[in-house]
Amino acid sequence: MKSSNDKSPEPSEPAVARLAELIKAYAPHDGIFDLRVPGVQVIRRSRVYTELVHGLQSAAVCIVAQGAKSVMVGREVYEYDASRLIAFSVDLPVAAQVTRASYAEPFLCFRLDLDPSTIARLVLKVFPHGLPRAPDSRAVVLGQADANIINAAIRLVELMAQPGDAELLAPLVVDEILIRLLRSPVGVRVAQIGLADSGVHGVAKAVSWLRTNFAQPMKVEELAKLASMSVSSFHQHFKSVTSMSPLQFQKVLRLQEARRLMLSAMMDAGSASWRVGYASASQFSREYGRFFGSAPTKDIARLRERVGEVAEG
């Protein structure tokens, strides 16, 4: 079996062009489109973002067929395009920018959700003698685009035109993409998603709780217990994986949700701050301004002038 340290074959230009053509067919205009297979999406953006767009990125692998994008997690910045794929091992609040796109050549991306139970099942096949030690546990993994993964993604999207074949064969092709990802140079880090005894798996449990209960008071001791770690170990693993402390992570979730409530539900700043768990309106306004660059009222007024760009992280 190929070592996870072996270099992956680079995709050919015709293969990348074919994937771009297929994405265009299923993403006829700007937006995020669910395909027939659960957990598979294609994305199209026709212009460069002039500023960061904040949102929640789910655990997934993203393959760019055209254009480029950057994602900021905490203070870490990751840039990817058709030469580099990116994988997120846990759900993360991110700030993103499409950095290369136009109406003539839009940003085009294929996205496949990473399910921990599926990863765990496949890890047993790919690493039957045990998983090598991962170099680090960061939740964001950048790797060279792999010709085999690109070709499998092409076959998966092509199946969408054949409903009968898609139902039977798509799960097999999804497994192939994940197996090839696990066998790639970044595979050991991706594999941690499915390991019950890994720091990534424990942090993922805590992240899931924070996502559901971000408006509630947070007790680090309880999160550490949920992750089956000591408090000190949990702090260390959480920051290593997410590039944020648990408190910073909760704050970003609260501020992003408050922004969404004000923009889409027409909620005023005071009501939004209370809804997401802030007891002090002045503290909310202060932290909102530091995070988004301007006070809530001013920021929302500006955003409404360019509705549509804020929908995707």
Image (cartoon, helix red, strand yellow):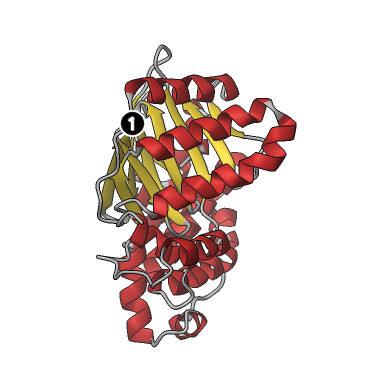
**In the rendered view of the protein, which quadrant contains the N terminus?**
bottom left
Task: Say what secondary structure mark 1 lies in.
Answer: loop
* Residue 292 pos. (x, y %): 37, 46
Label 1 sits on what residue type?
A: Pro
Visible residue check, residue 301? no
- Seen from the viewer's position, the closer of residues 9 and 205 is 9
Left or right placement of residue 112 versus residue 15 in this view = right
Q: Nearer the viewer, residue 86 or 153?
A: 153
Residue 259 spot, x, y in % from top left: 51, 47
Residue positioned 35% across, 26% down in the render: 67
Q: Residue at x 33, y 22 (%)?
A: 13
Answer yes or no: is residue 246 visible.
Answer: yes
Say which residue appears at 38% left-offset and 20% top-offset.
Answer: 14
Which residue reaches farthest top? 104
Number of numbered tags placed on the structure image: 1
For label 1, the residue is: 11
- Residue 216: where, in percent of width, then height? 56, 72
